[in-house]
Amino acid sequence: MRRVEVSKSRKVIDQRLRRSKIPPDRIFAYSDVPFNELTRGGDRLWIGHYVLRTAVGFFPALAAHVLKTALKPDVFGLHHFFPIGTRIQKVMIKETGQRHSAVEAMRVIFSRLEINPQLVSNFAQSLDELLMNAIFDAPVDKHGQPSARGRDRTLNWPLSSEEQVQIEYARAPDYIAIGVTDPFGSLDRQTVVDFIQRDYTTDRYKVVRSEKGAGLGVYSILESGQSILFCCEPKKRTQVVVFVPICKSMRKFRESFHFFGFFFR
């Protein structure tokens, strides 16, 4: 396990870490520079997990779960990121139209917690984005080509047993998380980094359907201050988890943990 403090000498750090041959998902970087700014202008795939310096309070407890998971062969499932005994709720999406009802059901659950209404709205939107990616962007055929992009996203389509998507939800005293898992494993680390490096606020944004997902969803999740963790077993499954601290005010939220990470196995 390696902890990295990103500073002005990060070119030196780049070289040392590349030579060390440490798996990226066991490297944790800590900095006050936003991740999309850090990666802009250069590929930094040697960083598996990135934590903003604003992380305070209960984040070490969550970080400990992520650190321990980095040493395990199986990184899938929300149980890895919560205390032992935490109840993990699971729902299977068997039709595309169930996406809307799942998002609204989660919105109701979130609103019952002591969370700022804006955070509730952002968290529900994140779930919708993750489900859109899992249902329409993740599916690929035997040649690795997108197989569900042409579906009308406004209509209800049945999903085969090989296409069904799983939602997991759990809460700790200080944070909540929701995970969406697809059975394709079509995501790759470079694709996500490329999405984050884009500046959608200044560059004209156009959806390119030939890409594996438009990327705006991932970018918006990070821009809203939520934390996101990608777990991918290539050609088998991908789980994306979003974490949010339980905060009554946006000020407390901004002062809480913010991180971004990869587990690609």
Image (cartoon, grey):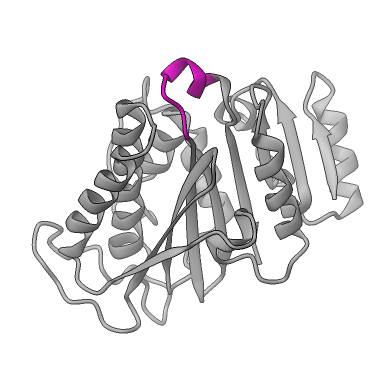
Image quarter of residue 140: bottom left
Q: Which of 188 and 102 is in front in this view?
A: 102
Residue under the point 74% across and 66% down? 72
Image quarter of residue 118: top left
Q: Using residue 256 as the reference point, say whether residue 50 is left or right of it.
A: right
Image quarter of residue 220: top left
Residue under the point 19% across and 66% down? 96
Query: Residue 165: where, in percent of width, then height?
Result: 35, 69
Q: Using residue 36 as the reference point, say whether residue 224 is left or right of it.
A: left
Asked if the stretch drawn in magenta spans residue 251, the answer is: yes
From this view, report whether residue 134 is shown above or below residue 242.
below
> In the rendered picture of this protein, how many numbered marks are placed on residues?
0
Query: Residue 222: where, in percent of width, then height?
Result: 47, 34
Which segment did they paint magenta?
246-254
From this view, report whether residue 116 is shown above or below residue 77.
above
Query: Residue 228: where, in percent of width, then height?
Result: 52, 44
Query: Residue 20: where, in percent of width, then height?
Result: 91, 50
From this view, report whether residue 166 is shown above or below residue 64.
below
Residue under the point 36% across and 52% down? 130
Q: Which residue lies furthest to the top in this view?
A: 251
Asked if the stretch drawn in magenta spans residue 247, the answer is: yes
Q: Using residue 225 as the reference point, say whether residue 134 is left or right of it.
A: left
Residue under the point 36% across and 22% down? 201
Q: Nearer the viewer, residue 251 or 186?
A: 251
From this view, report whether residue 83 is shown above or below residue 172.
below
In the rendered image, the quadrant that contains the C terminus is bottom right
Q: Which residue lies furthest to the left in this view?
A: 155
